[in-house]
Image: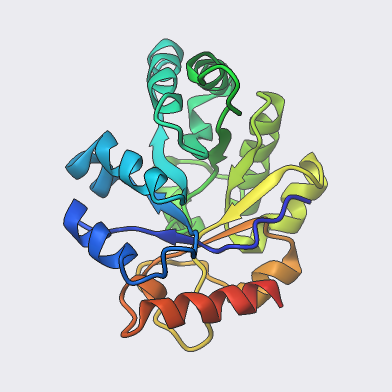
Amino acid sequence: MTFEARPIIALDFPTFQAVKDFLAQFPADEKLYVKIGMELFYTAGPQVVEYVKNQGHRVFLDLKLHDIPNTVRSAMKVLAGLGVDMTNVHAAGGVEMMVAAKAGLNEGTPTGKLAPKLIAVTQLTSTSETIMHSDQNIQTSLEASVIHYAQKTAEAGLDGVVCSAHEVAKIKNATGQNFICLTPGIRPAGSAVGDQKRVMTPSKARQIGSDYIVVGRPITQAKNPVAAYRAIKTEWNA
């Protein structure tokens, strides 16, 4: 099992300045693992990745690429050059696309550097089984769909998947114990669920075998983000 001791903080901010203000609250020697998603990347571009990396933090670039294999391969070559630590695609793009994505990352990684980890989205944690049936016309169970996507991701040679913590054990049984399961939808006990349909506490996610957890609003919208982060980190490592 791969285990990252730091919760990944979702920097879901609308501006580059908001990111700077947020990170400035943490001591300079406290190195974080953060997620940069679509809103922030499309607003600030590669400069936000460069800034965060220069601060000594790790970056999960969450852009969920899904396109024809050649386009994804070319895009991944560019993303690898940014020095991100992890990025992702949609497993629904298929094995050929995922293989191309991994090839692009390897080609774009500077000599002497490790290629970023590459994981795939199975079903979004905002997707319920009813939504999957009606909107995607996938008529298996949600669990069966997730496991199928995870197996295809492993077949393509990727490092793991983004999934609900509820699915971790069965995904690892279907793929391997070293197959990464990164789980969003993490909420401390008593916090608002928001737009997530399938959530879990940090301690339960750890017990169930998650390798990485992503936490956003419970930290970024807290009155004291540093204290909130440290409390979640403590619970995650307990």
Say above or below: 59 vs 100. Answer: below
Quarter of the figure with the C terminus: bottom right
Single out the residue that lies furthest toward the top.
70
Q: Position of residue 76 (x, y in %)?
A: 44, 23
Q: Position of residue 134 (x, y in %)?
A: 41, 49
* Residue 55 visible somewhere in the drawing: yes
Counting labels gives 0
* Residue 15 visible somewhere in the drawing: no
Single out the residue that lies furthest toward the front.
29
Q: Position of residue 216 (x, y in %)?
A: 40, 66
Residue at the (61%, 28%) spot, across then down: 114
Q: Nearer the viewer, residue 43 or 113?
A: 113
Say above or below: 30 vs 71. Answer: below
Is 22 positioned to the left or the right of 191 in the image?
Answer: left
Residue at the (26%, 38%) spot, across then down: 47
Residue at the (56%, 22%) spot, across then down: 102
Is 76 positioned to the left or the right of 223 in the image?
Answer: right
Q: Position of residue 201 (x, y in %)?
A: 58, 76
Q: Nearer the viewer, residue 62 or 27?
A: 27
